[in-house]
Amino acid sequence: MTNLHLEERATQIASDLAVFADIGTDAPSVESVQGGFSVRLTRQGEATEIAVSQRSDALIEIWGDERQKHASLKALLASERYGNLRDWAAKQVAFLDQEMRKTGDLIDISGYLNTPFNSADAAAVDDSLCGSQNVDSTRILLIDGPAGIGKTQFITSLSKRRADGFMIRRRPLILHVQSRGRTLSYLYDLVAFSLQRIRLDVTFDQVPILAKYGLITLAIDGFDELADPDGYENAWSQVSDLIAVLRGSGSIILAGRETFIGRDRVLKDISSLRVEKDELNVLTLQPPSKSTAVKWLLSQGWQEDQVAVIEDFLEPNSLALRPFFLKTLSNPEIAQSISSSNAFSVLSILMDAMIGREIAKFGEAVERSLNASDRRKYLISLLGEAARDMAESNNSAISDATLSWLVDVALPREIDESINRILKARSHALAFFTNDDRRGYRRFYHDKFYEYFLSLEGVMHRERV
């Protein structure tokens, strides 16, 4: 390696380590020394020197009376004084064990990776994400599917798999970044919150460097929930910037509903993406088969006669097959009430669970303006108006423009204009709709959704009259 190239390497190391320098201290400096260069910074209160040698790619870290050799900058970043990934893995295992105990038993999920002919479970997706990667690239995995299909569960399962096996396989740990109802103003706020939940010492600005070197993978979950008053432009712009920063050996997972996120949308809205260099994969999650769902419900305490009542709701592509709704049905009280229920009552149980799930995802800004009761009234009214518009126009779909207009009709009272714009942006990504064949149009995900909300709208119309 020439002296010029060695200096460039030392300068890049100094730049990457800048976020690890103690607050209030000077940025890392590069000095020429005999046999190479020295990167100097203050880390954890200690004057630290990183020796960059012409003889080897290895780095020598010196602080106080300590001296440690690292095979590469990646190894240094993974070590105890920087990313401390052993500690990360241990804390993540403890955290996810606790979360999974709260959630209870869930049905296994799989999907199609890139084509309908390539079925993949968590293990297969894990292997795919860790395959060889182009030099100086970013690997992107989109996880899509309808509401309740198990996108969050899948990422959690993948995160647990990585953390459990970290000491043996050394695969990148996953930082699961969830919107949790937050309006996106700054993506790194969500990253910081995710780090805080696991009680990690790593800071939000260090995460992109760890990801760039393939030590961790960022998973942004609920991307379709990150609307702000300007729609989703801010979300796409920040992810675009992040993908550029991760370029090297970085990977990122984006999860959202199929009505919002997809290969075409990503290629269109992420300006930093280089089709010829970066890698884009799509995992479309699929519901379990009817037989698998029945077997799982029986394992949760259901009786054969109870299963028979909802058998029509377990046909392919039905709402009840989605893991979220199977979990809802597994509630012992619901199982007990099923025996005396008719088909419409079963549909009502599922719709009520879906409405409750959806009104919790509008974000803090909307929640400050509309309480849970108002949000529920608004959502039912919007979906009813949409069903009525389809019926009156003898059409199976509704345009995004009409949906946006119906937001004003459905709101129970006047609200701030910025909140109104958030709701209009979110109306195009509601769980009850899927994309129509016509661009810019939505249709109800299932005919039963349409029939349910049309009947509710009819009841509400008679009450208003």
Image: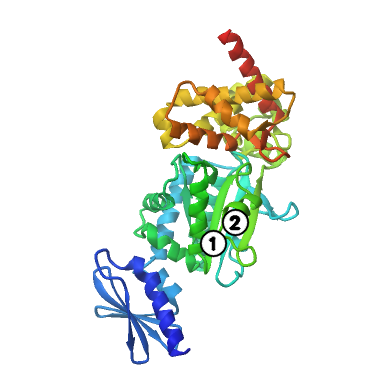
| Residue 76, quarter of the rendered image | bottom left
Q: Residue at x 44, y 31 (%)?
A: 417
How far apart are the alpha carbons under marks 2 and 1? 8 Å
Give the camera-side residue of 290 and 259.
259
The amino acid sitting under disc 1 is: Ser
> Where's residue 348, x and y in %?
61, 23
Please state, as top left, top right, bottom left or bottom right, where the C terminus lies in the image.
top right
- Tell me whether circle 2 and circle 1 mark residues in contact (CB < 8 Å): yes
| Lateral position of residue 209 relative to residue 312, left or right | left
Q: How many marks?
A: 2
Q: Residue at x 42, y 69 (%)?
A: 78
Q: Is residue 74 visible?
A: yes
Label 2 crowding class (10 Å Cα cut-off): few <14, some 14-19, many 20+?
many
The image shows residue 138, relative to residue 253, as above or below, that is: below
- Per the image, label 2 sits on a secondary structure element best described as strand
| Lateral position of residue 443 relative to residue 195, left or right | right
The amino acid sitting under disc 2 is: Leu
> Where's residue 453, x and y in %?
63, 22
**Which residue lies under the disc numbered 2?**
141
